[in-house]
Amino acid sequence: MKLVLEDGTQIQGKSFGYQKSVAGEVVFNTAMTGYPESLTDPSYKGQILVLTYPLIGNYGVPNVAIKDNILQYFESDKIQLSGLIVSEYNEDYSHWNAEKSLGNWMKEHKVPGMFGVDTRMLTKIIREKGAMLGKMICNDKDVEAYDPDKDNLVDKVSVKERIVYGNGEKKVLLIDCGVKNNIIRNLLKRDFTVIRVPWNYDFLNEDYDGILVSNGPGNPKQCEATINNLSKAMNQTKPIMGICLGNQLMALASGADTYKLKYGHRSHNQPVILANTNRSYITSQNHGYAIDRKTLPKKWESLFINLNDGTNEGIRHKSMPFFSVQFHPEASSGPTDTEFLFDDFLKMIIET
């Protein structure tokens, strides 16, 4: 198997998982653990993921059938990314709750993998030249190049009908743009009733106490229906919280603009600072777009700033209970420094 990047770079490797050729955007993640969560994260839809940590597969994959409303160990019900590239793949897993190998799990979901690659060298190429399109070519069977930014990926990963979880006193309307299961877990843990609706659902006549706009893949400007509905929702006083893509959608609904980052933020140890303070947090991130904070309307302000490159990591309204963050406060496998933001959201709902 070989990887072919759009700049002409070709890298040879060995195949594992499912045997097929795929195309997509090549991105990287620097996490040491959490590949079952990353592979099932809908934010990776249409992408070929490079894991920089050298050894992958050593703890296998947990039971895929254990659930309590939602799967216990995964962020969605299937592998979402197009392909996986690792340095060293270990088929001989060992972990107390492992049920199968990573390779066998990928075969079940028809997702190809490639190992024997210097993934840190590959990551340096992406950092220097920017995120680029690529192909994983298996058995010399070429495929057409694919640019996921030109597709409405959110429509592919969002639920198609309204689903209700829990029976709490307060109701949260969850706009599913590719929501991670751990967001739902965090809401249920705080005794919310969660009303999960499709990305383009007209929710303005729903009975709810607050809105949460989820994470998701791709270009936020593809989600016009969500942006329009959020803009209308901002005419009332019910609290609104956004996460990752939800941060960008709230910005667009407020009148601000977004842009594509050179290679995105995809790691478990991104430092951010609370705006106008010296308080910093370590966060998990997975996004290719950011808010142009210079375009924020006067009634809005930055909430968090990335300490590595100064990009926006969250916004809030100066007088209304609306806020959003670019990172993942629900991050699994961590860090969990910012999970308190769900408590802030609950407090807003109680006090409104």
Image (cartoon, helix red, strand yellow):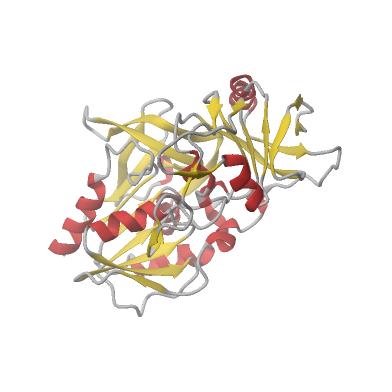
| Depth order, front residue of 289/142 | 142
Image x and y of residue 110, in percent: 68, 51
In the foreground, 315 or 189: 189
What residue lies at 41% left-to-right and 33% top-to-bottom?
Answer: 268
The quarter holding residue 169 reads bottom left
From the top left corner, tell me how far across and down residue 187 is, in percent.
28, 58
Residue occupying the far left of the picture: 351
For residue 21, above or below residue 185? above
Question: Is residue 40 at least partly visible in the picture?
Answer: yes
Q: Residue at x 31, y 38 (%)?
A: 304
Residue 104 horizontal/vertical position (percent): 62, 45
Q: Nearer the viewer, residue 217 or 107?
A: 107
Q: Is residue 31 left or right of residue 172?
A: right
| Residue under the image location 45 percent in, 62 percent down | 176
Count how many numbered circles sit on residues in the image.
0
Can residue 289 be seen at all in this image of the molecule?
Answer: no
293 to 344, vertically: above or below: above
Q: Is residue 113 left or right of residue 255?
A: right
For the point 42% across and 54% down, which residue is it? 246
Point out the image quarter for the N terminus. Answer: top right
46 shown above or below 160: above
The C terminus lies in which quarter of the figure?
A: bottom left
**Residue 320 location in percent, x, y?**
23, 58
